[in-house]
Amino acid sequence: MVLINNSEKPSEDLDDRIKELKQSKKKADEKNQLLHSFLLNDIGSKDLDYLRELLNGQQLIKILAELDDRRQDIKGLKYDLNIKNEELSKLSSQLEYFEKK
């Protein structure tokens, strides 16, 4: 948590931190979208014969484990994004407060 003395004007550090959080959020959004798109398109692009082969072997288990890992990654990215959004919201509120002074 960032503590700011109310008698001081917002510093460049605060502006830099806000920019950093916005960039981090943008990158997390892009990664989340890419992972989501990949999961949907990757499975949809397979032909039925290949899927039948996968159902007969250990490859299916590996792919399901990989899918689960990717879903966990997405959940982690969403969690990180929510934390960054909260931090950004707090910093934005502080910035608005100081801009009004």
Image (cartoon, rainbow, N blue to C red):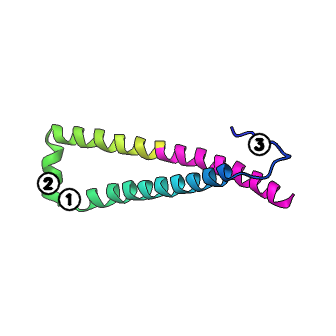
Residue type for callout 2: Tyr
- Marks 2 and 1, Cα distance to the nearest angstrom? 7 Å
Q: Where is residue 56 in the image (x, y as percent from the top left)?
A: 14, 42
Q: Position of residue 57 (x, y in %)?
A: 14, 39
- Marks 3 and 2, Cα distance to the nearest angstrom? 59 Å
At 74% from the left and 39% from the top, the residue drawn is 3
* Secondary structure mostly seen in the magenta stretch: helix
Q: Is residue 37 magenta?
A: no
Residue type for callout 3: Ile
At 12% from the left and 57% from the top, the residue drawn is 49
Q: Categorize mark 3 by other alpha carbons within 10 Å: few (<14), some (14-19), many (20+).
A: few
Label 2–label 1 contact, CB within 8 A? yes
Pointer 2: what residue? 50
Residue type for callout 1: Lys
- Marks 1 and 3, Cα distance to the nearest angstrom? 54 Å
Q: Position of residue 94 (x, y in %)?
A: 76, 51
Q: Where is residue 72 in the image (x, y as percent from the top left)?
A: 41, 41
Q: What element carries label 1?
A: loop
Between marks 3 and 2 in the image, the one whose residue lies nearer the viewer: 3
At 29% from the left and 38% from the top, the residue drawn is 65
Pointer 3: what residue? 4
